[in-house]
Image (spheres, helix red, strand yellow):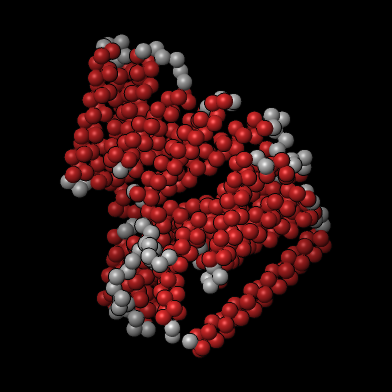
Amino acid sequence: MSSQGTRAKTRSVATIEPATITAVNTPLPAVCLKLYLRTGNGLSLGMLDYFYHKRLRQDLETWNAKGWVTTDGASRILATLEEGDGRSRIPMVLGGIGVVCIALAIAAFIAANWDGIPRVAKLIGIALCVGGAHMLAARAASTGRRGIADLATAFATLVFVGGMALVGQIFHLPSDWSGGAFLVCLGALASAWVAGSRASLMVAACAAIAWQTGRVEFGDAVAAESLIGAAITAVILLHPVAYPHRLGRWAAIALLLVTYGRWLADTTRTIDPAGDISFAAVILGYGGLAACMVQVGQLCDLYVKWSSSYPQRSQGNWLMMSAAQAAGFAILATLLTVQLVAGEEFTTSPLGAALLTPPVAIAFALALAMAATGLLLAFQTPKSRWLFIAVLVALGAIALSLAFKSILLTAVLSLAGLIAISLLGTLYNVPLWTLCGYAGLTATILYLLDVTVGSLLGQSLFFLIAGLVLLALAWGVTRLMKRSRTLRAQAGGKT
């Protein structure tokens, strides 16, 4: 085999392996376990950890029977999995609940003795609680007790949040919940980055969401606040990359969706006060954003494959992109279903005007550009090509359904997009993607049965046609897979 072919194969392996496995001669089961533990694949699937562990136990039996792993090695692997179960997190959960209770107790004590505690004493007490908690966190972090440091920082953040309300009461300040949420977000965000606190990040994300949804200003101030919101969202999104945390990832993604929705609402309110383009703008805008979330991780994989410097992605980076892909596919499946079910209520929503709205135009154009770039980079990676093709199918289904406003065409396009998502989840062996596609297919089929089929004979005909179409798809996929295997075998024989 030529050196160029060897290099291409080495790069292909690098795309599968987010963390470097240094031992070249490591046995296969050990490689699988190390990849699981270091990339956090089970953590990215959340509730599917149980199914992964069950499958791994079955695989270990097969590997042991084939002599790939010894009985002692299999026992050690299972013991490692048991060490990583939820029992090890019970003390931290209990400690977190205790910290919340103590913070609430302090706030209730001050409220109960409001008139009896001097104003200066209240302010000094709040400052001492915040400062003392941070000192305790710094002390714990210096000794390597990250859990205690995070709990202490969380306590300081909660006292800071309560102190904001108490200071407002002390000085009789006018109530501005949106402004208060903004200040809480800044304080919690500073604590999250300075101390690396994951709990403080959760507070910052919740406060940022409250600020984005609570502010009601429209007009000249919207542009500045949108930029500030985008900056805060970027800072919060980067935190789970530096300090991996499952809840932090999903909180940051939720904030991203809310921030984009606020930008979209501000823009459409200014351009179209009557709200005629709202439905199309929401469908197209969130469709483009979801497509970007799905494709960014795959583009990074392809960049690793073709980069001469062989960059390695961190665990937090990989987990964040996995969570973004899962959220993106869930959004695409939801939009493909919603536009069919609720599309008739918004038949006057114009496609052209919605596409020209800046948030929609940017998200949709970026999604198409990423798909085109991905298809170019994936000319030697068939598996990656299918991901970009599925995204284009979903985006095309969304746009064409809004353009022609035909329930028959919308139904066909929605089913095509949902089937593409389901098949892609099967191809990549990610059950959550497949589940999103199946859920959308179920809702779409039930809706079509309710709307278009009124008799048992009609239902029989509907299911017969659906079954024949799916069988034809299965036959086509089988032919493509056989052809792909034949081409790979021929290419291997030539080298």
- Which quadrant of the structure image shows residue 93? top left
x, y percent for residue 333: 61, 53
Residue 410 drawn above or below residue 190:
below
Q: Position of residue 271 (x, y in %)?
A: 67, 32
**With respect to residue 92, does 486 lie above or below?**
below
Residue 485 left/right relative to 80:
right
Pick the quarter of the image with the N terminus.
bottom left
Could one spot residue 184 in this view of the protein? yes
Viewer-proximal residue among 334 and 113: 334
Instruction: Determine the image quadrant of residue 156.
Output: top left
Confirm whether residue 40 shows in the render: no
State the count of labels: 0
Taking the spot 24% from the left edge, 34% from the top edge, the residue there is 134
What residue appears at the point 24 percent right and 42 percent down from the top-left corner? 148
In the figure, is residue 487 to the left or right of 354?
A: left
In the rendered view, tell whether residue 100 sits above or below residue 123. below
Taking depth in this image into account, of 78 and 148 the one nearest to the observer is: 148
Task: Residue at 81% x, 60% y: name it.
Answer: 458
Is residue 465 shown left or right of residue 229?
A: right
Residue 398 picture location, percent across and down: 68, 52
What is the quadrant of residue 442 in the picture? bottom right
Q: Residue at x 32, y 40 (%)?
A: 193
Q: Is residue 252 above or below residue 23?
A: above
Image x and y of residue 431, in percent:
52, 62
Front one among 428 and 65: 428
